[in-house]
Image: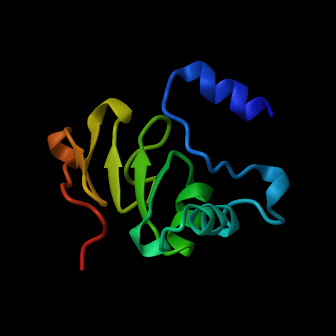
Amino acid sequence: CMADVRLKATGFLISSVLVTAGMIRRGKPDPECYLLAAERLGVAPAEALVFEDAKAGVAAGKAAGMTVIGVLTSLSRAELPADWHIRDFRDVTISRNGASFTVTASDPSARRDNLPPPG
């Protein structure tokens, strides 16, 4: 599919799980796409991270019970009600230690280490 071609062109490591619009009945802000992805990855929604730059995507991620990191590409922090915020993906480092991951944002005003959510 076209998504595969475009993702491969980025040079990023691509997951074996891809959820496309044709696989779901309801689009964002419904959480169906995120819940399907988590199910196919074998990840509990509470342990998943969503990176979003749109209000509908943030709403979908939160409705799925996931931690949402707002990417401030076109909206401000006030306009994007995510759990945490980053300016762009250059602000993020993801490291793996066995089965666990640590996500660190380098922007001091958005810094949150050792996600998932607070509380």
- Coloured how? rainbow
Does residue 88 appear anywhere in the picture? Answer: no
Q: Residue at x 61, y 19 (%)?
A: 9
Q: Quadrant of residue 88?
A: top left
Q: Quadrant of residue 25?
A: bottom right
Q: Position of residue 49 (x, y in %)?
A: 42, 59
Q: Residue at x 32, y 29 (%)?
A: 90
Instruction: Give left or right: position of 111 versus 15.
Output: left
**Where is 89 relative to 65, above or below?**
above
Q: Position of residue 96 (x, y in %)?
A: 26, 49
The residue furthest bottom is: 119
Q: Position of residue 97 (x, y in %)?
A: 22, 53
**Where is 15 relative to 59, above or below?**
above
In what quadrant of the picture does the C terminus appear? bottom left
Nearer to me, 45 or 78: 45
Instruction: Give left or right: position of 43 versus 30.
Output: left
The residue furthest left is: 108
Q: Residue at x 78, y 30 (%)?
A: 2
Q: Position of residue 11 (x, y in %)?
A: 51, 21
Instruction: Give left or right: position of 1 versus 78.
Output: right
Q: Quadrant of residue 63?
A: bottom right
Q: Residue at x 49, y 28 (%)?
A: 12
In what quadrant of the picture does the N terminus appear? top right
Does residue 116 appear anywhere in the picture? Answer: yes
Q: How many marks?
A: 0
